[in-house]
Image (cartoon, coloured by chain):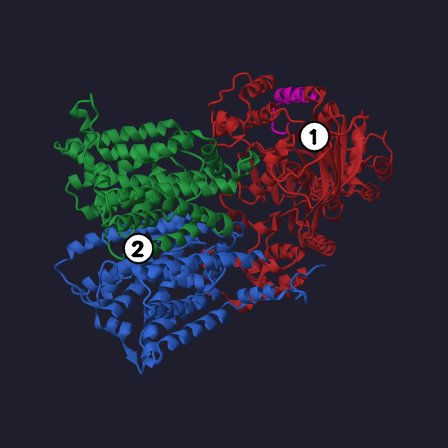
Chain colours: A green, B blue, C red
Amino acid sequence: MTAFFRGKGWVTGLFIMLALLLVFTRVIQPNYGANDFGSLVRAVLPFAFAVAAQTVVVIAGGIDLSVASMMALTSVIAAAMMDGATEEFALLVVPFVLLVGLSLGALNGILIVVTRVPDIVVTLAMLFVLQGAALLVLDAPGGSAAEWLKELVVGTASVPGVPEAVTDWIPKGLLLLLVCLGIVWIPLRRSWLGLSIYAIGSNQLAAFRSGVPVARTRIIAYAIGGLFGAMGGLTLTMSTGIGAPIPGPYLLASVASVVLGGVVLGGGRGGLIGPIVAVFILRLVRTDLTLLAIDPNVAAIVEGTIMVVVVMLGAFLAMRGRTQ
Amino acid sequence: MSISAAPEPSVSLRRRIKRFMSDQPLVPLLILLALLVIVLQILRPGIVNERWIANTIKFAIPLALLAGCQTMTMLTGGIDLSVGTVATMSAFIMSTQVIDHSPAVAILICMIPAVLIGVANGIGVGIFRVHPLIMTLGTSLIGIGCLQVYQRTVIATGTKVPDFLGWLGTGLSYGIPNALLLFVPAAGLIIFTLSRTGFGRLLYAVGDNEKAARLSGVVYWKVITTLYVISSLLAGIVGLLYVGLIKAPSLSLVEPLVLPSVAAAVIGGTSIFGGRGGYTGTILGALILTVLTTLLTVLQMPEGARRMLFGLIILLVTAAYLRIVEDR
Amino acid sequence: MTTSPLLDATGVAKNYGAVAALRNASLSVLPGEVHALMGANGAGKSTLVKILTGAVSADSGSILIRGQAHEIRSPAQARRAGLVSVYQEPALIPDLDVASNLRLTRTPVEPFRQWVRELGVPDLDLGETARDVPLAIQRVLDLARALAIEPDVLLLDEMTAALPSDLAEKVLDVVRRQAQAGRSVIFISHRFLEIAALCDRATVLRDGETVGVVDIEPGVEERIVELMLGSRMEKARASAADADDGRQSGTTPRIGVRKLRVGAKLQDVSFDLHNGEVLGIVALEGQGQDQLFGALSGSTRPSGGVIEVDGQAVEFAHPTDAVAAGIAYVPGDRADALLMQQSVHHNIALPFSANPRSWGPIDTGRERDIVRSAIERLQIDTRAQGEVQRLSGGNQQKVTIARWIAADARTILCFDPTRGIDVRTKKEIYQLLRQLAEQGKSILFYTSELEEVQLVCDRVVVIFGGKVVDIMPAGIASEAVLTRASYGLPRDAKPASDTSAVNASDKLGPS
């Protein structure tokens, strides 16, 4: 069971489950088409980035409770800066916001390393601090987003030479997600730094003995988490056109997707693909519940229960892993 | 034979202060409280009067009780973020059920979800070993979902806050808040439980050193499950008191008290790592935060700054606490 | 020997707080030699290894490699200086595959493959996750990884402990050739056979000091044992006269251990613990004694065999079951037993509230009386009773035992209770254990200080490699006898070596 859980088999299983869910969706709602898929992707985007942020940190053996606040803060910063500004100015805003995310993530890591306060307490405090900061930037939903940014997640991609029937099913949002994650994750995964992140999560002592600078690697992992969080914040602004200072329900969803995606709480195992597929599954379950004409509030309960059970299972497996 | 306890004359002043702070955490808290009140009086001369004091106490009581949940769970190295949802649920359910039932029945009904969430928290934390923060956050989300569904079913019923809750929440007798009638026994019971019962001892024990407690025959999950049920019940009672104070049941009634409840317990000297602290400090912490909130309002500090400040307080107090412990 | 040493550590000292783990250790390794590093438990061996590998830094002393002074602050720095270690526990990152592990440590792959083949593992899949590789193979991979870097000095810590004999042979063979190629190997092992077969010289540590460097030649085991024991040899022999043989045979034992197995560490252990007896357990570090105590205290599930309490077979699912059967466990690390931030009183009273039936209000008067009498009985200094962490080590240890005297446990499992505490408290604990035994309680007493066996125990069980190698009455269990037995050597010394240890260490002082 555990061997399967961390193997490639798990990710394959998740893909199959996603495919089955899509088929199921088509069965209960024969009209479910490319448009609906596009809106699913748009709904998934912020969740997916939250999950990516959480994944990197969890692989490094930590946890980031501040991820939702980080997204809220970066989102309002972007929306406030772009409010009334030119389209071109947004070209500056995006890298600036990403830099803010990166630095705040690094700050999380530095506080953990320097104060030696456990990650869970530091990021809890940062949850409140970033949330407060978001309220200081915008005390109510507002601001705006550049048109070209908004267009990045609207509509479908057109690839020359590929029939429209196919490209209809490739929303721009999906491409955006894959490009943003890939640009950071693929080089990271192949680098020595990436190995070090897995190493400190897997066994800190062995990592130290293998010559890994543990503290520095931890800070970098949190910084990358912050970077993904900022991307998530930007997608929030892109898809809504405004910034909202109140953090969304991304924390629990990110932890649950990470666990469901085969990344063991405690670190060292798993990859990014599993959690991203998992977050699609969780969102699609939500969609299906709505399509089945279930009260959205009941759907929220079902979704919450699924997430809690998944997290409990993950914690249980992590505990078994420790004792074995 | 070395006895590190014998007060060495060479102990530096800094060390002595640290030791004093960890032995007598209440004294600096009282000083801090007094300072805040004085600053407030200077900024707004005349604001500190009998009515203000009664009002401060009235608003500090629900916070202090909710911080009681955090104190007890933090003693075991946990935290209970579901208290806001639980309190809101009990308040809302009671104020809708009371239209069809007698208050006593309504209160019994509204405690059911509290117990259920407490049991779920206890099982998740005690048996499955989910981090309490994640677990209680999860049950809190589910609870809010349930409450929203519930709201749909009673949308036509309307809400009512029984008079005696209003009397308890807002009333004054001879200038003294009636809420103290609930608070004094409740606080007494918490303090007694923590210091004079076997269960209270175990809270400190599992939070201080779970392994040692285990080797002494303590079964972790039993303690933890009981604890989270008690915490939920207390949160449910806070909901009833708070709805009597605010008089307008809503779906996010008590949510704004969650962060301050954690901060109050941390300020009051309860270690977020477990094993150290007590309820007396928490009560002072709640008073300090209530006065601080007034002060921030007087200074026209925005809500965002307040949250940042509370977050920083949690981080700084925890880091400072680690230093005090390590230096010994 | 005119060549200058490849590694030359002199005057190395390290203090942990007030405790001196190393006072004056030296280690000089010549090119082309396999050098054994030896010492009894607590002699400072592991601290010296930590310093050499950069896990901790020394307080004083110098480390020269090829005549150059080096400051070693991390394993990476040690490696740059030419010193590579293979640790006791596997150092592969469990969740990475072998190839990634090589990349992480920047190890060249081809030489690594060659070494792996040479070490007797022909079919290694580099894509396999380290966690799935059997433990013995992981050790081999660790060694191959170290060899592939071509270090000047190779440090092997208990390299062969987890290896089956065929792999161990290959390893020894490779190590020998490594030395022939002009490199040096520091070899740490508890197995005299290996050391005799492999090493050229041995450095012996005792009480944090280098007490001798000997050439390995036939019969050197006795001299090494003598060096490790030092002046304690004489005293131990003198008291070996009054043999007191097995008591209470025939009655039902309080605890019967029958063919107990726990994982791979403890294999097939059987013995009886009688009422009114202090039974000693003697073993080198990591021979399975932790697992034995874990199983008896309900912390670890045995993988085979039976534990009997008063003649009845029992299964402990949780320490609470053992406590209910009157078996209390005092772990070796006080930090595992104490509530450091709580008072002496609360620590002693802890077992009282463990059961949910006693979660209610505490009868403070009665509790105070019981606790007070336990405190008086152990003469705990209560001036700092507010918080246990402010007590001295000795008083802390007394609290861990007082708890079970207050709870009136019938059997106490004491794991090295006198480690790192002052002499007076040690004596008090010996007396206490004897008194308890006289009252009919039974005590299982693991100790790393062999002299304690004759001071406290009635009988002693010696464990080596997870098996009972000897059970003897304490009367004949002198330190020399126990040391030999715990290294798996025959109980009695060969009469050949009669050199007094004091002379030996004078002659063999570091040159």
Q: Is residue C447 magenta?
A: no
Q: CA distance from mark 2 to mark 1?
A: 62 Å
Name the image quarter holding residue C46: top right
Q: Using a 10 Å C-alpha cutoff, classify the residue at mark 1 as few (fewer than 14 neighbours), some (14 to 19) or many (20 or more).
A: many
Main SS, magenta residues: helix
- Tell me the kind of residue under disc 1: Ile
What chain does badge 2 belong to? A
- Tell me the kind of residue under disc 2: Val
Residue A153's label in the rendered image is none
- Looking at the picture, do discs 2 and 1 lie on one chain? no
Q: Does residue C340 appear in the picture of this structure?
A: no
Name the image quarter holding residue B286: bottom left
Q: Position of residue B198 (x, y in %)?
A: 48, 61
Residue A137's label in the rendered image is 2
Comparing marks 2 and 1, which lies closer to the viewer? Answer: 2
User: Which residue is nearer to you in this view: C93 or B95?
Assistant: C93
Q: Position of residue A151 (x, y in %)?
A: 21, 38
What chain does badge 1 belong to? C
Depicted B103 relative to depicted C427: above or below: below
Residue beneath the point at 16% across and 39% down:
A291
Q: Position of residue C481 (x, y in %)?
A: 77, 37
Instruction: Quadrant for the N terminus of chain A, please.
Output: top left
Residue C186's label in the rendered image is 1
Question: Which segment is the magenta one?
Answer: C160-176
What secondary structure is marked by label 1? Answer: strand
Depicted B149 relative to depicted C98: above or below: below
Q: Position of residue C48 (x, y in %)?
A: 69, 39
